[in-house]
Image (spheres, grey):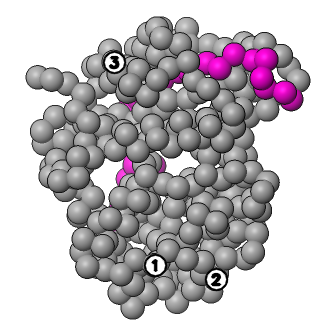
Amino acid sequence: MAVKKVEKIWMNGKLVNWDDAKIHILSHVIHYGSSWFEGIRCYNTAKGSAIFRLDAHLDRLYGSLKIYRTESRYTRQQMQAAIAETIRANKLKACYIRPIVYRGYGDVGVNPLQCPVDTAIAVWEWGKYLGAEALEQGIDVCVSSWQRPAPNTFPTMAKAGGNYLNSQLIKTEAIAEGYVEGIALDSFGNVSEGSGENLFLVKDNIVYTPPLYSAILPGVTRSTVKILARELDYEVVEGPFPREMLYIADELFFCGTAAEITPIRSVDKVNIGTGKPGPITKKLQREFFEVVQNANDKHGWLYFVYND
C-alpha cells in the first residue's frame, strides 16, 4: 500500500517538511538494520481522534531498545507528546503512526555504539493492510518455506528493523505463489506467525495462539484479543501447536495493528471451517471495533489527540 504524503515528519525534536526528512547514505541503519519501531493506529472514533493502546506500544518500543543496549534521548512522555504533535501538525483525524529509533551516521563498522541514536515519527492515512474486503471475506494464505529465527539468534521480542528481512522472504514468497500472506513455522516446526501479524486458531470453541517462545512478536493487538476473548467467556490457550492443526481448525485469523482482526479462509488451498469467517472471529471483530470506532473503552486503551 502506497504511503500518502502529508506535510510534516517529526525528526529529533523538530517538525520538518515531508520531502526534507532525510538521512545520510552511510547511516548505520541502512547497512545493518539497526532500527526499532512501532506500528500504531489513530482512529477517528465516535468521540474524536484517539490512538489505540499508545502506552503498550511505547512499552514495547523501549523494551526493544533495551534488548539492543540502545538508549533514546527522549523519554516516554516526550515520545507520547511528539506523536500527538505530529498528528495535529498534519491535521489528521485517523492515521497510521510510525515512530522509529535508529542508528544514524557516525561509523560504518558493525559496532553500533559510536553511531548517534536518532528518532523520527511519521504519520499517514492508511487503509486496510491485507485488502479492503479482507476483514469481511477472509484471505488465502500458505505455510511458508521460510522459518522464523531459532532461539538465541535474533530476539523476536524486539520489533527491530533487521528482523523484517525474514518477514520479507515470507511475504514475497506468498505473493509469488498467489497468496495474500504466509504463515511461518518456528525452528521446531510449530506454528509461529505471519510476516507481520500474530495468529489465532479456534477449535471446539477454544482459542489458541502460539507462545512467545515460538519466535513471535509480542503483539499489542494479540494481547487485546486475548483479553476480549476471555471477556466473552472463551478459553484462551497459549502454547505450541503443529502445522497440521491449521488445516483442521474451525477458524483462523491474523491480528495486528495493520491487519486489525483479519479472518483466514484457507491455508495451502485447504478451506478453514466453512471457508468463511467464523462466528468467534466475527464476535472478536465486533468487540474490537466497538472500542476503536465507537469508543466504548472500559480498559482505558484510547489516547485522545485533540482536546476540542
Does 231 appear above or below 28? below
Q: Which mark is residue 85?
A: 3
Residue type pointed to by label 3: Glu
Say which of 252 and 74 sits in front.
74
Question: Residue 165's x, y, as percent?
Answer: 73, 46
Mark 3 or 1: the one toward you:
1
Q: Is residue 191 left or right of residue 59?
A: right
The part of the chain drawn in magenta is 110-136
Q: Residues within 10 Å of mark 3 (few under 14, many from 20)?
A: some
Q: CA distance from mark 1 to mark 2?
A: 14 Å
Residue type pointed to by label 2: Pro
The residue under the point 41% across, 44% down is: 56
The picture quadrant where one finds residue 23 is top right
Under circle 1, the secondary element is strand
Q: Residues within 10 Å of mark 2 (few under 14, many from 20)?
A: some
Circle nearer the N terminus (2, 3): 3
Question: Residue 51's x, y, as percent?
Answer: 30, 37
The picture quadrant where one finds residue 308 is top left
